[in-house]
Amino acid sequence: MLLTIVSFVVVLGVLISVHEFGHFIVAKAVGIQVLRFSLGFGRPLISWRRGETEYWISWIPLGGYVKMAGLEEEGMVGELEGGKADAAIDPARTFDKKPLWARMAVILAGVTMNLFLAFVIYTGLLAVAGDQRMVMTPVDSVDASRVPAGAEALATLRRGDRIVRVNGDSLRTWDDLDKKILSGPEALRFQIAGRPEPIAIHVPHDTAARHQLARALVPLFPPRIGPVTLGQPAHRAGLRPGDVVLRIGSDTVVSWTDMVRRIRESVGKPLVLTVLRGDSAIQIPITPVPTDSVGQHFGVIGVGVNPPLVRVPVGLGTALAVGVRQTGSQVVAVVIQVKRLVTGHASARELGGVIAIAQMSGQAARLGLDFYLQFLAFFSVSLAVLNLLPIPVLDGGHAMFLVAEAIRRKPLSPQLRLRLTQVGMVIILVIMVLAISNDVIRNVR
């Protein structure tokens, strides 16, 4: 519980600070009077003043804000932001007195900083630690149905056999093996540890056949739990990231494949998992729920794989390119999910609130610093995209005000902006109540 709380506070603190610092620094740069910089809403727990700006750490840790001259909302929003600031307003330095481009730059600075933070994390991990790859483990099994003609000899591999070289080149990761299979010559020689003679196969340069061969070799991963999906049987039963499944019922579990096979065939049937957590073996009752995929009906419990990984060094150019690509792909993923929610293709029950964020933060922390930083980057992208929704109170809503001003060639009246902002606040509060309700329901066992 302590790890979950600390990891959540760090995630929220970092992302809010970065977001609001973006607004703050650009507002200062274009000459807008900044009255208050606050992490959190409501009245301050800690406050100090430097120059004309108040700095607060407030008691509701669900966001933050930069109060600028000319945007001092009253009523519900004003109270949520701690009321009026004490500093005298300089009429020449209010938000509305600045050019449209300057105001738009201030509004978009927060989401820009969140996207930049994600890019820095992804790029930094690659540049400093290297690219993440799955360690070359022994073979768990060979899917004979996928072995193409000419490669039948690979079906002689048994669980525990370790492929150490292909055509004389040693292997460190499963990616190394895939590359040898996909781009190697027609004749491939697999050296197996403990066998005097290699396995020789001959596969033509057919892309489909080569991919089929690569997928036929199943790696032997330990049955170690990775991310746990909130609300699913594993979460409700109390499984945690890092738990290692030792037995299901009285049957010993050797690999991840063993565990998945047993769960898939046990739809609706109660199982007892014996897991190793730290130095203790504990028993966890769990019942797989049914799911359908590609015409198949099988059981799931809602856990992800946690394979042994290694970082492979990459150049700075590659790190920058991959950092951009990862950030962009995360933006697309979040936009698609928002679209599915808005269009009704996804249930509103999928929404998560602060409890869900805290639980995911705790899971990421248990999986290690690497995973935690990647979660921080993903959540930073999510915060950026969600803040661009055209809802007053959010950055997207303020941007829409400016777009309307550009079209009308005059700003919306302060009264209209205030009413729209209050409507936006009601919408946000409704979403928050729904999300927190979902969190509570997910955690009822």
Image: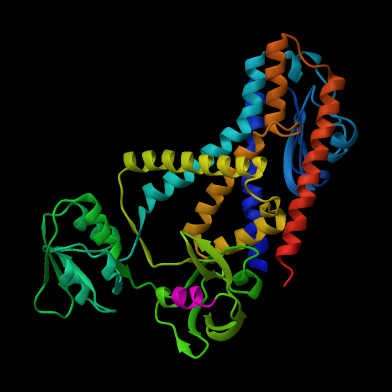
The reply to whether the magenta stretch includes residue 156 is no
Q: Quadrant of residue 152?
A: bottom left
Q: Position of residue 305 (x, y in %)?
A: 46, 66
- Residue 435 vs residue 265: left or right? right
- Residue 441 vs residue 360: left or right? right
The reply to whether the magenta stretch includes residue 263 is yes
Q: Position of residue 132 (x, y in %)?
A: 37, 56
Q: What is the residue that sits farthest to the right in this orientation?
A: 75
Q: Quadrant of residue 255?
A: bottom left
Q: Is residue 427 above or below residue 379?
A: above
If the image is split into quadrants, where does the N terminus sit? bottom right
Q: What is the residue that sits farthest to the bottom in this orientation?
A: 250
Q: Main secondary structure of the magenta part?
A: helix
Q: Is residue 95 at least partly visible in the picture?
A: yes
- The residue located at (61%, 59%) in the rendering is 360
Q: Nearer the viewer, residue 131 or 68?
A: 131
- The residue located at (57%, 33%) in the rendering is 112
Region in magenta: 259-266
